[in-house]
Each structure stands twice: as structure tokens, then as C-alpha cells.
Amino acid sequence: MRADGRRAAVVEYWRTVELFSPQTVPRLEPRRHVYRAESGRALPWEPEHPLGAERLPSDMIWRHTVYIGIFSVARVFEILQDVLRFDPDPDSLDSIPTGRERARGLRRVC
């Protein structure tokens, strides 16, 4: 396998691992600068957004993370149980997953 193909295979492997290891999404809390993006409304990095009125010290910049593909892990678990027709292993030390997770996150620094 050529070096480029090997690198691509490694990246593909880690993408697959990430799909099965989703990251938690923070709660929507405007006081902590966590907002929901809504159609027709300004995004946090746009001057019209309320965050645009906040000033940072001159040695700091804003970093925004956009979460996409948000889903309920518990709901996915329920669907898999229904489709694959299995019962949770009563001897498993893992609990049934809960919470909201994300498939991907994008970062914007401004």
C-alpha cells in the first residue's frame, strides 16, 4: 500500500471509531454562551447576535463550536434493540446510554 493510501486508511479508521464514540453536547445556556442556531436568526459570530455586544480583552478571541448531527443515545439504543431484537445483557457493567450526543463538531475562530 502506498503511503497516501495508508494515511487515508488510518483517517478512515479513526472516523469509524469516532462514529461509535460520540461526544456529549453541552446544554443550551446563553449565560455560558451556548446557543441554538435557528433559521433567520444571527449566529454568535455575526455582529447582530447578542454575543456581538460583549467585548473581550485585547489578548483574547472568540472560538465557536457548531455541533451537527445531534441525537439521543438512548433513542438510538432503543431503535437498535427493536431492529436487532436483542435485550440488554443483565450481566453487563455498562448502563444503558443516556444524553444528547453529536456526530460532528466544527470550529470557527474569530
Image: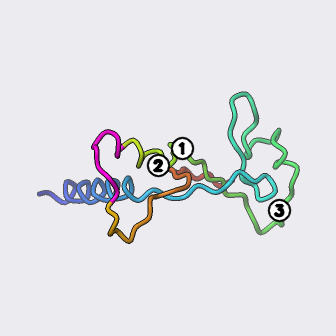
- Label 2: how many Cα within 10 Å (few below 14, some 14–19, many 20+): some
Q: Assign a secondary structure to mark 1.
A: strand
Q: Which residues are magenta?
A: 80-88
> Is the C-beta separation of discs 3 and 2 under 8 Å?
no
Q: Assign a secondary structure to mark 2.
A: loop
Q: Amino acid at mark 2?
A: Ala
Task: Say which quadrant the N terminus sits in.
Answer: bottom left
> Is the C-beta separation of discs 2 and 1 under 8 Å?
yes
- Provide the residue designation for mark 2: 103
Q: Is residue 82 magenta?
A: yes
Disc 2/disc 1 C-alpha distance (Å) = 6 Å
Give the mark nearest the N terminus, 3 or 2.
3
Q: Position of residue 49 (x, y in %)?
A: 81, 42
Q: Is residue 99 magenta?
A: no
Residue displayed at 57% across by 48% down: 67
Please state which of the two labelled residues, at mark 3 or mark 2, is closer to the viewer: 2
Q: Is 47 drawn above or below residue 65 in the view shown?
A: above
Q: Assign a secondary structure to mark 3.
A: loop
Q: Position of residue 96 (x, y in %)?
A: 44, 59
Q: Position of residue 80 (x, y in %)?
A: 35, 44
Disc 3/disc 2 C-alpha distance (Å) = 30 Å
Residue closest to the eye, 90 or 31? 90
In the image: residue 27, left or right of residue 69: right
Query: Residue 56 shows which numbered tag?
Result: 3
Q: Amino acid at mark 1?
A: Ile
